[in-house]
Image (cartoon, grey):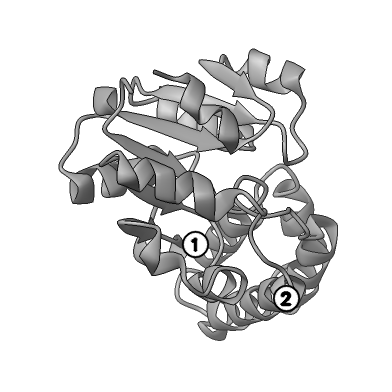
Amino acid sequence: MFFKGAIFDFDGTLTELTLDFDLLRAEIEAIALRYVTEDVILSLKNHYILEMIDEIERLLDGRNAPFRHEASTRLRDLEVEASKGKDVYPYTRDVLQRLKDRDISIGIITRSCIDVLRTVFPDIDSYTDSIVTREDTKYVKPNPLHVIEVLRRFRLEPDDVVMVGDHPTDIIAGKALGMRTVGVLTGRTTRGSFENVQATFIFNDIRDIFTLT
């Protein structure tokens, strides 16, 4: 294989994407309305949920400090609830093990919390070398610093690692570092959307990674 490491997204890439993002957003907005006006929330409609929380905290500027704790706790609870009874895709463990058997370093980056990963994939440590959730970094994808944290742990250069995910944020984060990227069609992103962000490869699922020889 032309790569020494592979970084995978989690939801939609290694396991079925079951999160109801509209519900998550509505719940966080309901909390935010106790701290800021509806106009502020409307102004953040194009922000992802985590970035919306960050921006509201910034606007509060130290006032009403409980907001982040309350919003983050509710987000975690909803994510974990949606993860109960789930497992990774039937082929996920086999793919990761086969890569490890070829001395490929395996990393996972996710905007989710670690409790979600351990609920869905309790034996995750046996198949990975590095996991970086939102608790581990100030900057989450599409910010490339999320990916850089894994590269640092791997002690590998971007050219040595492939970024694999089911969402444009995965591709954008990897491309910002000059990495080769793989979009997989197991989430909610279409082939056209991956083409728009110029994914290097577009596969049906992670099993196709073995074509990269």
N-term mark: 2 or 1: 1
**In the rendering, which numbered label is found on residue 58?**
1
Question: The C terminus appears in which quarter of the rendering?
Answer: top left
Please say whether residue 178 is visible from this viewpoint. Answer: yes
Q: Nearer the viewer, mark 2 or mark 1?
A: 2
As drawn, is 166 to the left or to the right of 16?
A: left
**Residue found at x 75% / y 47%:** 45
Asked if the residue under mark 1 is in contact with the one under mark 2, i.e. CB atoms within 8 Å, the reply is no
In this view, the residue in front, 139 or 182, is: 182
As drawn, is 200 to the left or to the right of 144?
A: right
Using the image, determine if residue 1 lies above or below residue 94: above
Q: Which residue is mark 2?
A: 78
User: Distance from label 2 to label 1 (Cα)?
Assistant: 24 Å
The percent coordinates of residue 87 (x first, y second) are 67, 66
Of the residues shown, which amino acid type is indicated by label 2? Leu
In this view, the residue in front, 56 or 134, is: 134
The secondary element bearing badge 1 is classed as helix
**Residue found at x 79% / y 51%:** 42
The percent coordinates of residue 212 (x first, y second) are 44, 20
Of the residues shown, which amino acid type is indicated by label 1? Arg
In this view, the residue in front, 90 or 181, is: 90
Q: Are there few (<14), some (14-19), or many (20+) residues within 10 Å of tag 2? A: some
Using the image, determine if residue 68 lies above or below residue 23: below
